Image (tube, grey):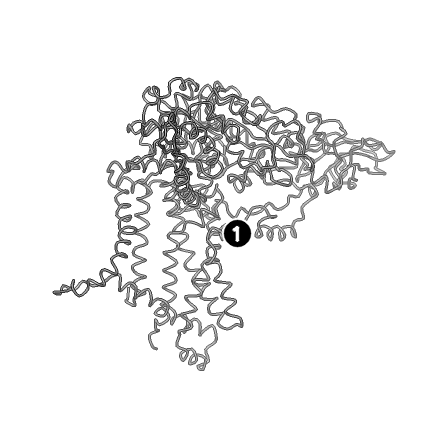
Amino acid sequence: MERPSARGADVVTSVVAEGLKVAAPRAPRQHGWWRRNWVSLAFIAPGIIWLLAIVVYPTIATIRFSLYNESATKFVGLHNFASVFSTDTILTAFKNNVVWVLIFPFFVTFIGLMVAVLTERIRWATAFKAIIVMPIVFSTTASALVWRTIFDLDPHVGVVNAIEQTVSDWFSTPGAYPLNSAIGQTAVSLASFNATGATGGTLLSKSAVQPGGTVMMGLTRISSTTLQTLGAKTPVAPQTIAGGIAGLVWNDFSPSQTSNTTTIVSDEHGLPNLRLSLVNSTGSSVASTVTNSSGDFSFSHVAPGSYHVEIQASNFQTSFVGTFWLGSQSITPTSGLNQTAQSLLSVPLIDLAMIISYIWIWAGFAMVLIGAGLAALNREVLEAAEIDGATEWQTLRRVTIPMLAPVLTVVFVTMVINVLKVFDIILNMAPGSSQGPATTLALSIYNDGFTGGIHSGVASAIAVILFLLVVPVMYWNLRKIKGGSP
Amino acid sequence: MNLFGRAKASRKALIAAVALTTVASMSIILSNGPALAASSKKIGGSVSIWAEWTSTEQQDFKAVLQPFEDSTGIAVHYTGKGSNMDTALDAAVAGGSPPAVALVPDPGTLDTLAAKHAIKPLASILGTETKNYGTAWSNLATYKKKLYGVWFKAANKNTVYYNPAVFKAAGISSTPTSWSQLLTDETTIANGGTYAPVSLCTDIGWPVADLFQNLFVKLNGATAYDALAAHKTKWSSSAVTNTFAEMAQLTGTSGANLLGGMKGALADGSWPNCTTSVFPASGSPTAAMVFEADFLTSNVPANYTPGNGSSCTLSATAAPCYDTFNFPAPSGSAYAADIQGSGDVAMLLTSTRQSKALIKYLASPSAAAIWANLGGFVSPNKKVALSSYPDSVSKADAKALTSAKAFVFSLDDLQVGWEPALWADMLNVLQNPTTSNVTTVEALMDTQATAALGH
């Protein structure tokens, strides 16, 4: 089979290549060269001077700074590089860069390819492509803020957690008085008067009660919104009923008498809709009921004996709290390791959230390049495959992708370079507490170097390392673009 | 954390701010041209001054400068450098063209510049104006027994901002004056079930460092504080461990006193979001108090009135308000009057008739009183009458600042090379204050400090 042509890449990048040829002229040593070329030199001189001033000089200065102390006054040799590799925060940055490089370029190229191939065969392809490309037009800051909201912890704000909540509530319906699991609440922590924690997250009345008696139980930490929603009314002390047990469960918190936790105060509320059981002396439930809007309840026709009233656990079933998508909790089990090992091995969940967002931003770019490559493919080969009876999938895998390989490589490598320098999405998407665990080399340069005065040493050392990482990839990419083999 | 805190919080605006101030400073130079017309008894000429203030603060500071320009005929060219101030001044001094007068947000820069002889001693220039400052403040502007600076603006971090209406709804009628009362009030608010006691600012860790520093200086005093800042005291010392223990009391077991628990504090504790849970522009507050310095005021929505907490309620028709109380010192604190904060110190870089007149003016109570009147400003100058302040909140702040026994700046800003690591460590202890974890983190902090500071 014919060697797949690199025409797609040529179409896209020939302009760049032309530019490179101008920027890097060969220097022939012929006599009279200056006389023949002074006009062209005069024309490119402003560009050259500009490049020297804003690219070459800063590069050399950065290398120099990396060998000096933080205020650039004393030569310290490779000391800054040593501290780069021994500082946990910077090792974390290295680790995160690796995570980004391993995941992002592959998926963005893959998704770009899929979208490019699929949009070839639909109507309104242009409109569809325009929508996919649109995120590139937005500033990364804006995109990051949008995604930060999408992944927000609060299900009322973040759509991802809202979906999770909906699904979770199908499986476990929250009770009328859901515990706040965010602050580690348990049923026991609600008990205020005559209530004690029992097995399975239930609350049991401390005092025993006989038929004809009454029982009162006070809870606390019930939000006023919950009380309002349930239409809670002023509690009334229970009246005895012959042969039955009457009682009250009320919110034992009064703003006017905060320390009074045993008696009913006028600005307190009964607790409606609580599911209760009557438990006999052997511990088995003999009857159940629900409190009314004043928090009152009664069990009638109770056989003689000693009983306790149980508030069922289902009343306190917690509601979904949300996944902290933007948090630093690791998806690899590293919590038992020491600090340095954690810096190197833990993958914070926020990395994935940010990579997803960044794919959304860049998939359009990949699609455009790959789409251009697709348009330039030799149709005869594709038709030949079709005539030979290849399925769509076979054609894609055996014909299209090999023929597109040069374009895919360019996209992939461009994305590697892009992601080595990733900065703005982290600064804008990570909440403060995750900024440290989610940091990358580029962000470390900024944080170490420019916040709180200039500290040029370590930051420059990181910059030099990042430069050394990018240059080979860049060089390879340029060779590729120019059509040479790497 | 001093005003850098704000800078870090708003670093997204940094580039915009720098760009804007460049344009602004150019227009200042242009518009001040005609003001040079001096009468015979006026000094005339011009003087340049740099500070970090931009936007509203820049306008306020220019209002301070206006009477000086009018009475002396000196044209003052002000440049607001934003959070870039230290960096810009460094570069200008190195480049040999510094402004005549500069205000920097930390005493460390004053010491550095004094060591380089880049700033001038002020005692003879200021004369009696030196008596306007308490010893705590004079000491902070002194390098090798010579006075080099004038503290113009200060922030007190020894405050708790609270929503009086929430306190009232939770049944708390008077603000806590002791540590145990503060803890009891937290429980009371939690028992109410509707509001979280504390909305904790976590951000990248600097507000937690502020909280730590606040407790540390009260428990151990300014001398021990300075020793820790210089890493002469180890992070693994009992002084630090005790401070972490007090901090854990405030947050409660697994963040029980915090809005949204620990997870919520980490997810939503970014500056300035943590203040809006206590002071929402509309809707109900969800937490009762927030700890930070007076720069928090600028994030309180405009419809809030400061002070006079007793008349505030949560009803839909009542105007919302905010108030502060002094951060109660932990039980057994020997240094309850030592406070932590931040400030801006004015220094003289070039000595001319004009610049001397300007720095003398900045040390005078009349200059500070102008900004005090405009609000959002507290002066460490004790001659500024308390009546100059527009509300009880800033009056209380000014009183605390001028009478401070010792005043310390954020020690995290002195931890060059490992400041972000220190913040991360603070968040680490906050999340897991068990003895074993505190020991681990403290050992780590000592390693980090030694690596960065060299001892």
Work out which quarter of the rendered image holds the N terminus of chain B and state it: top left
Expressed as whole percent of the image width and height from the top left, the position of residue A20 reads 28, 63
Q: Judge by depth and name the residue closer to the eye, A170 or B427.
A: B427
Chain under numbered label 1: A
Q: Is residue B1 visible?
A: no
Residue that protrudes farthest toward the front in the picture: B40
In the displayed orientation, state which residue is furthest to the bottom: A387
Residue B387: where, in percent of width, then height? 55, 22
Give the quadrant of residue A34: bottom left
**Is residue A28 found left or right of A73 in the rendered image?**
left
Which residue is labeled 1 in the image?
A146
Can you tell which quarter of the image residue B126 is in? top left
How many marks can you see? 1
Q: Is residue A178 above or below residue A215?
A: below
Foreground of the two, B72 or A135: B72
Residue B115 picture location, percent across and down: 29, 27
Measuring 51% from the left and 29% from the top, which residue is drawn there?
B247
Residue A397 is situated, as x and y percent measured from the top left of the image, at 43, 71
Q: Nearer the viewer, residue A482 or B252?
A: A482
